[in-house]
Image (cartoon, rainbow, N blue to C red):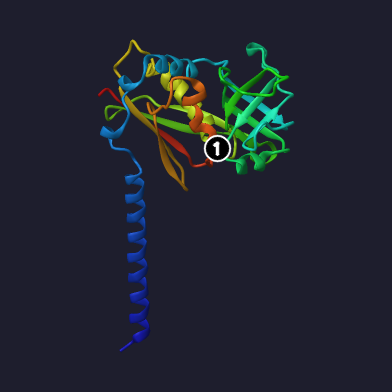
Amino acid sequence: MNYSKITVSLIIILLCTFSFEFSFNRFVQADESRPKIESLKKKSELDSTALYNIKTSYSQDNIILDIKNKTNSTQLLSNDLIFDDITLKEWNKNSLKTEFNSSEIANHFKGKKVDIFGIYYGANCIGEVSKRTGCIYGGITLHEEEKIDQKNSIGVNVFKDGSQQKGFMITTDKKEPTIQELDLKTRKVIQNQYKIYNSETGNIQKGYMEFHSNSSSFYYDLFNFKGKYSVDFLKFYNDNKTINSSNLHIDVYLYSQ
């Protein structure tokens, strides 16, 4: 009996079995990360003031800040960075503060050249006494380490009640942009096309946005907001979460009920 051939055959069988189980487990985990439709928040559950402010945040062009190559000058708290050399003429501000959910994130970017991409808010923004400060949450990436010569294009698929709609592309000039950047670019298009945050249009009641890359998959509920005002409902961006922009696509699922 040729034991060497038997041994090789057993190894091949075991490797194939392991490969199948690994692929299957990855599929199950990715599938389980998706929300159940019945668990999604409904647009009709949002307060009218909140809905108006959310619509404003994701509709206006001038509320999105895209600023390159800046270094913070000071801090108010250990979990924020303040840039005193940024002027926002339209908002009559001469300082910008970004706030994170931990001091560790702030320390990672403190004193370094960074790029800023975030959604501005002014009401209830607390800055330095001598400055007129505007605020964002998160939105920070390292200037030198993340920039790329050619922008990465990211495809966005749109599904309405299970039926695929016309998709679109967004771009980024960073290797690992913040999720906030990609989310803002995507929601703005979705809001313009489907008016999902308009009070007078109720044809979209639920939805979520799913980010798919080779390394991770996760989603945002499009109507899961906490609070009525931007200082509160934009706070989820303070994790400054990033994702690799190569081999990435986004799926948006919209539901009328």
Residue identified by numbered label 1: 101
> Depth check: 166 or 240 in front?
240
Name the residue located 34 percent from the left edge and 70 percent from the top edge: 14
Pick the quarter of the image with the N terminus. Answer: bottom left
Q: Where residue 220 appears, x then y in whole percent? A: 41, 33
Name the residue located 37 percent from the left edge and 24 percent from the top edge: 166
Q: Where residue 19 appears, x then y in whole percent? A: 37, 62
Tell me the quarter of the picture where residue 64 sits: top right
Q: Where residue 132 appears, x then y in whole percent? A: 68, 17
> Depth check: 180 or 176 in front?
180
Name the residue located 71 percent from the left edge and 22 percent from the top edge: 86
Helix, strand or loop at disc 1?
loop
Name the residue located 34 percent from the left edge and 76 percent from the top edge: 9
Decide if residue 217 is on the left or right side of residue 1. right
Q: Residues within 10 Å of mark 1 (few under 14, many from 20)?
A: some
Decide if residue 82 is on the left or right side of residue 168. right
Tell me the quarter of the picture where residue 71 sits: top right
- In the picture as drawn, the residue positioned furthest to the bottom comes out as 1
Tell me the quarter of the picture where residue 37 sits: top left
> Depth check: 159 or 77 in front?
77
Count numbered badges in the picture.
1
Decide if residue 2 is on the left or right side of residue 113. left
Q: Is residue 188 above or below residue 215?
A: above
- The answer to whether any part of residue 13 appears in the image is yes
Pick the quarter of the image with the C terminus. Answer: top left
The residue type indicated by label 1 comes to: Asn
Q: Is residue 110 above or below residue 66?
A: below
Q: Is residue 47 above or below residue 101?
A: above
- The answer to whether any part of residue 253 appears in the image is no
- In the picture as drawn, the residue positioned furthest to the front comes out as 129
